[in-house]
């Protein structure tokens, strides 16, 4: 019987495992860190077809290899927040315009958002659920990196729930990640301490920059508009300025 890999759980206060090797992270070489960063990329996106989605989502939701959860409160009105969530491509263009890192590149492919990550991740983000205060996205794709030619399967589920509070919007982001192969599970087991730290650092940075973007759209949309050109500028003006 194959032994399952315990999920790594993060809730701002730390990851739900004890491993002395995590305390030696600062002693690792930069090249080793980059290698493990690529291994993390293996499990963030999946190669799959839309016909597989129900089974894929259920398995991922019930038995993730990695589970991350973060709660945050941002200064944003419920109206602006919902508009932002309904404009993922436009927000992606603003991410590029601000020069945030990683330097994700965004494009639209029908009803999906195509994302290219500089680490080699290439994938499509599918919106599974849209309701007031709730968005669920399923990510499919592949790792396109010469250094890891065989480890290219995984999947991710992002669930964002939010509600209005006196300060603005209180939200919780849950990210569930699952490898698609026995080899991927093995990689997760071997790389677990460093993988956990990398997940924490990457998503914390993304949330910090995301907060700046959201709160600036709320408080100074005209200044944000200056960063855009052409159709992106027209769309932003229509949604947030008019």
Image (cartoon, rainbow, N blue to C red):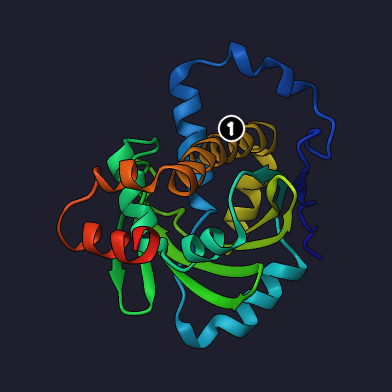
Q: Residue at x 53, y 34 (%)?
A: 205
- Describe residue 19's horizontal placement relative to residue 55 as left or right: right
Most foreground residue, 237 or 103: 237
Pointer 1: residues within 10 angstroms few (<14), some, or many (20+)? Answer: few
Q: Nearer the viewer, residue 174 or 119?
A: 174
Q: For mark 1, what is the residue?
A: 201
Q: Quadrant of the C terminus?
A: bottom left
Q: Residue at x 69, y 60 (%)?
A: 162
Q: Look at the image and tell me whether residue 104 can be seen.
A: no
> Residue pushed farthest front?
242
Q: Relative to residue 146, is residue 154 depicted above or below? A: below
Location of residue 85 in the rendering, given as x and y in whole percent from the top left corner? 51, 63
Q: Nearer the viewer, residue 176 or 204?
A: 204
**The quadrant where residue 103 appears:** top left
Percent from the top left, x then y, of residue 89?
A: 35, 62
Query: Residue at (71%, 69%) from the top-left corner?
Result: 61
Relative placement, left or right, of 9 versus 46 is right
In the depicted structure, whether residue 121 falls above or below residue 231? above
Quadrant position of the N terminus in the picture = bottom right
The part of the image, by quadrant, that contains residue 62 is bottom right
How many numbered discs, if any?
1
In the picture as drawn, the residue positioned furthest to the top comes out as 27
* Residue found farthest to the left: 230
Q: What residue is rendered at 81% in x and 33% in y? A: 13
**Is 117 above or below relative to 238?**
above
Q: Is residue 89 left or right of residue 10?
A: left
For label 1, the SS is helix
Task: Choose between 153 and 122: the one closer to the eye.
Answer: 122
Residue 100 location (% of width, % of height): 38, 36
């Amino acid at each position: 019987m194959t032994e399952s890999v315990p999920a790594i759980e993060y809730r701002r206060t730390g990851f739900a495992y004890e491993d002395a090797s995590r305390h030696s992270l600062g002693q690792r070489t930069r090249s080793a860190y980059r290698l493990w960063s690529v291994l993390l990329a293996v499990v963030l996106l999946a190669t799959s077809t839309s016909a597989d989605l129900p089974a894929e989502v259920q398995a991922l939701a019930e038995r993730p290899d990695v589970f991350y959860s973060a709660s945050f409160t941002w200064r944003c009105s419920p109206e602006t927040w919902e508009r932002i969530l309904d404009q993922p491509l436009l927000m992606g263009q603003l991410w590029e315009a601000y020069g945030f890192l990683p330097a994700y590149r965004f494009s639209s492919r029908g009803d999906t958002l195509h994302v290219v990550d500089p680490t080699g991740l290439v994938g499509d983000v599918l919106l599974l659920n849209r309701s007031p205060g709730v968005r669920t996205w399923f990510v499919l794709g592949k790792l396109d990196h010469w250094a890891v030619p065989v480890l290219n399967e995984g999947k991710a589920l992002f669930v964002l729930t939010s509600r209005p509070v006196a300060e603005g919007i209180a939200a919780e982001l849950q990210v569930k990640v699952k490898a698609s192969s026995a080899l991927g599970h093995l990689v997760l087991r071997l790389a677990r301490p460093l993988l956990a730290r990398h997940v924490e650092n990457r998503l914390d940075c993304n949330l910090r920059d995301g907060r700046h973007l959201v709160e600036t759209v709320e408080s100074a949309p005209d200044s944000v508009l200056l960063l855009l050109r052409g159709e992106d500028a027209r769309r932003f003006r229509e949604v947030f300025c008019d």
